[in-house]
Image (cartoon, grey):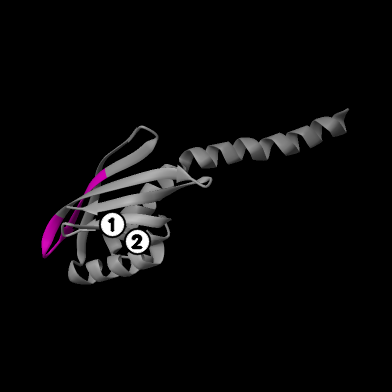
Amino acid sequence: MKMYLRVALLLILPLLTLNCVVGQEPAAILNKVEESLTSGNAAMLASTFHSRVELTLEGKSQIQSSVQAQYVMSQFFASYPPSSFTLSHHGETGGTLYALGEYRSAKGTFEVNIFIRFEGGTNRISELRFE
């Protein structure tokens, strides 16, 4: 009987932990986004993208692969090196998580809108706007 109880606990405890990790995933993505925008790290930022992501930069919006989006963001960071990035608000509407922030560079300040969707078993950025 004790052995069955131990086996049951060994099977149930990892599932409880998994549930906690999945519940924290959007916060982890936002932390990663904040860190990557603060440091201008396009590769780290791209690791949070869906395979296709809509980018809006300097008034132009395009849907791109995550690899193309990484290149575009590296060019953006080269043109507008970050001096700071601050998340000001986040929430959820219609199954989409969103966050608002402010990206500051010596060359300008941008309002940043981040949209995160749950697809394929993970939360990833589906849209990123710098306006």
The dot on residue 64 is: 2
Where residue 97 sits, quadrant-wise, is: top left
Question: Looking at the image, which residue is at 65% across and 37% down?
Answer: 15
Residue at the far left: name it. Answer: 107
Magenta region includes residue 51:
no
Tell me: residue 72, above or below residue 95: below
Q: Do the residues bearing badges 2 and 1 touch, measured as CB atoms within 8 Å?
A: yes
Element on which disc 2 rests: strand
Sequence-first disc among 2 and 1? 1
* Viewer-closest of 20 and 53: 53
The dot on residue 55 is: 1
Secondary structure, magenta segment, majority class: strand
Relative image position of residue 24 (x, y in whole percent):
47, 41
Q: Residues within 10 Å of mark 2 (few under 14, many from 20)?
A: some
Residue at the far right: name it. Answer: 1
Tell me: residue 58, above or below residue 87: below
Tell me: residue 93, above or below residue 128: above
Relative image position of residue 51 (x, y in whole percent):
44, 58
Disc 2 versus disc 1: distance between alpha carbons?
7 Å
Magenta region includes residue 105:
yes
- Residue type, mark 1 in image: Leu
Question: Looking at the image, which residue is at 29% across and 52% down?
Answer: 128
The dot on residue 99 is: none
Please indicate whether residue 111 sits to the left or right of residue 12 in the image. left
Considering the image in quadrants, where does the N terminus appear?
A: top right
Element on which disc 1 rests: strand
Where residue 94 sits, quadrant-wise, is: top left
Q: Which residues are magenta?
A: 100-109
- Residue type, mark 2 in image: Gln
Please indicate whether residue 6 sits to the left or right of residue 41 in the image. right
